[in-house]
Image: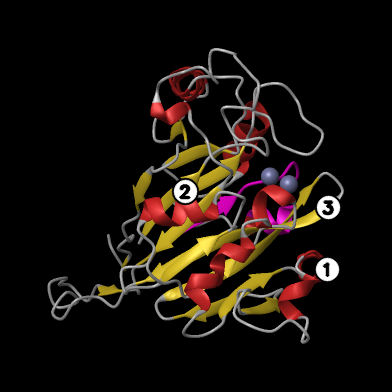
Amino acid sequence: MKFIVMGSGTSNGVPVIGCACPVCASTDERDKRMRSSLYVKGDNGERIVIDTGPEFRLQALRAGIRYIDFVLMTHSHADHIHGLDDLRPLSRIKPVRVYCSEHSFNDIKERFAYIWRKTQRGGGKPRIDLQAVTTPFSFENLTITPIPVKHGNMDVFGWKIRESYVPPDGAADSVSDGKSFDTPFVEAAYITDCNFISGESMDQLKNISCLIIGAPRVTPHETHFSFGEALAMVKKIDSPPLRQVFFTHLTDDYLHTEICEYGETWRKENNCPQITVLPAFDGLEIPLTPLIQVKGKK
Ligand SMILES: [Zn+2]
Ligand SMILES: [Zn+2]
């Protein structure tokens, strides 16, 4: 499975209109941050998009998206759903399923009321099969789990994706002494707009090897984790396989290179050499390989 970051920016995007700060003026492509979105490519051909922000069309073209199996929504703020209409070309053959929370379901129906209005004729709107979910569901080799978290006083979703692998023929035989394979898998989570994760939701993260977490800036924010708060969470997540942490939903406060330095310093000061902390950037591809668990290993 592969995660492809389609957008890593906060609600304004970066550069911010009218801003001439060093980050907005930077010529480093990694400092150009479209609104946050993720593209998930399963090894079995599964294709998922998380959030359709205002730049969804540009992001989909850049990522070479030709079809998608479904969309997962984190919440109904404008920077996460206002590109929904651009699902139109992807809904020609059949309606695109969009999974979201109950709260987002009502908001999306209201915000995009024309999509469901029977009186409008013609093809000038996407065909959306909107579904509110509360529990994990499976699709091909993937298991999709909504992770309820808080974004200020709003209940929103993070998403965990697990990919299970059927061991190749003969793989089990290559392990002698009565050892056998569990189903190998890889789990990774995407939690963008968030400033609180309950203990129950933390428990959902205990096998992840990669976390993309929204942390717009160093200074505190009412509805988002700061860099420090996000990393305090990372330390609390009791996941031995956790190796990669990426910040997303970034403001124009720091250059990509400065956030890299921040992560490196944190890792050294907190004695976490096994975890890399990096800023996400638009176009970043994160390959995720399965953990091979061997039962009864001495
Ligand atoms: Zn947002
Ligand atoms: Zn938000």
Quadrant containing the N terminus is bottom left
Residue 233: horizontal and vertical position, in percent? 64, 39
Choose between 79 and 265: the one closer to the eye. Answer: 79
Residue 245 in sight from this viewpoint: yes
Secondary structure, mark 2, is: strand
Residue 182: horizontal and vertical position, in percent? 34, 73
Above/below status of 33 relative to 31: below
Q: Are marks 2 and 3 in contact (CB under 8 Å)?
A: no
Residue farthest toward the front in the current orientation of the protein = 122
The 10 Å Cα crowd at callout 1, few under 14, some 14 to 19, many 20 or more, is few
Dividing the picture into quadrants, the one containing residue 98 is bottom right
Residue 186 in sight from this viewpoint: no
Residue at coordinates 43% horizontally, 35% vertically from top-left? 275
Residue depth check, mark 3 versus mark 1: number of the one nearer the observer: 1
Residue at coordinates 63% horizontally, 27% vertically from top-left? 16
Whether label 2 lies within 8 Å of ligand 1 gets the answer no
Q: Which residue is mark 2?
A: 6
Residue 293: horizontal and vertical position, in percent? 33, 64
Q: Which residue is mark 1?
A: 110
Highlighted magenta segment, given as a residue range: 186-202
How far apart are the alpha carbons under marks 2 and 3?
24 Å
Q: Which residue is mark 3?
A: 154
Three-letter code, disc 1: Glu
Quadrant containing the C terminus is bottom left
Whether label 3 lies within 8 Å of ligand 2 gets the answer yes
